[in-house]
Amino acid sequence: MADFSEKKEKKAAEKAFDKKSSMFSRRSTGDIVFDSINTVVLLLSVVIILYPLLNMVALSFNDGLDALRGGITIIPRKFTTKNYSEFLGKQTLPIALRVSVLRTVIGTLSSTFVTALLAYILSRKEFVFKRGLSLLYVATMYVSGGLIPVFLVYKQLGMTNSFSVYILPGMVSAWNMLVLRTYMNGLPDSLAESAMMDGAGHLTIFFKIILPLCMPVIATVSLFAAVGHWNSWFDAMLYNNTATNLTTLQFELQKMLSSVTNQNTNAETMKNATGASVTPTTMRAAATVITSLPIICLYPFLQRYFVAGLTIGGVKE
């Protein structure tokens, strides 16, 4: 009898599954047309986005004088690695690489921690001045003291020609603070209240409850901060222009871009001096690929946090 009932339930489950499968298999003409158009649009978007990147890579691996003829697409016409060897052979490159890595790591960690701590303070309902401070930080997104006053302030504080100018001014980001605060406001208040009833202080709540629950948004904010620090060059030019031991990769790339005034003349000069057919165009391409590679490699490691941020449900009341 038990075997008969089990077979009957199994048949009913199979019938329901077949019915559901048939429902999904019967697609209307509108659905097919929509999916086809959507696929074509997405493929065109991928091509539009990837082609400039692949063209840059192909140009960086192409012979400099041959590249002057034009017509390089996504495959090098005359393959060479002289552009990379020329750029990597610069004396300032090891210093610039070390400063860029240190700036990105220290700046990202410090900025994320301080901004998250500030966001936690402004997300507490019992904090009396949270509205006024929030408006003050938002105002900094629209109002600035100006380039010259800021430079004079940094100079008076002894931050010019120093590594601290890369870290301290960007310690707090108003936009990242708003993103973190909004996420923290969505967490149940009962989490912090129950922890306080058990004797936990605000630091304990912040480190052991809030931070673990905010890892997806913290990873996103950290990526924003890392990209900003890695790509920044203006502060190096403005505040550390004479300090060669504080140069960055992006500043070196900017100097390379700005130094090109006559491409053909520079190409012949570089060929006669080094014996390699290297032009400013191919050198710029190689430098761009090298400076962009670390950030591109960072994205896959943080992708799972972005996916978790879409699916996390938190703790329900």
Image (cartoon, rainbow, N blue to C red):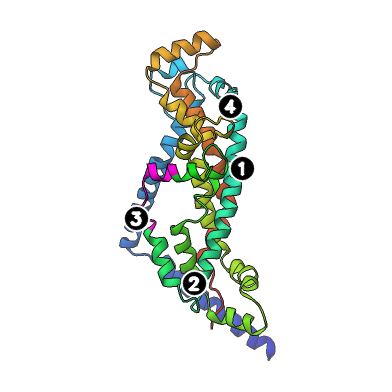
Label 2, label 1: how many angstroms apart (C-alpha)?
A: 31 Å
Label 4, label 2: how many angstroms apart (C-alpha)?
A: 45 Å
Whichever of callouts 3 and 4 sits on the residue coming sooner in the sequence is: 4
**Residue 142 is a magenta residue:** yes
Q: Which mark is residue 142?
A: 3
Which residue lies most toward the front here?
Answer: 156
Of the residues shown, which amino acid type is indicated by label 2?
Ser
Above or below, 114 relative to 299: below
Of the residues shown, which amino acid type is indicated by label 1?
Leu
Give me the residue at 52% from left, 74% from top. Answer: 187
Given residues 184 and 143, the one toward you in this image is: 143
Q: Name the residue tied to disc 1.
A: 102
Give me the residue at 40% from left, 41% from top. Answer: 47
Q: Name the residue tied to disc 2.
A: 123
Given residues 213 and 196, the one toward you in this image is: 196
For the residue labelled by badge 3, is the local secondary structure a helix, a strand or a loop? loop
CB contact under 8 Å: marks 3 and 4: no
Picture quarter containing residue 85? Answer: top right
Label 3, label 4: how many angstroms apart (C-alpha)?
A: 37 Å
Q: Name the residue tied to disc 4.
A: 92
**Residue 131 is a magenta residue:** no
CB contact under 8 Å: marks 2 and 3: no
Whichever of callouts 3 and 1 sits on the residue coming sooner in the sequence is: 1
- Residue 238 position in % (x across, y down): 45, 36
Which span is picked out in magenta?
140-152
Which is closer to the viewer, label 3 or label 1? 3
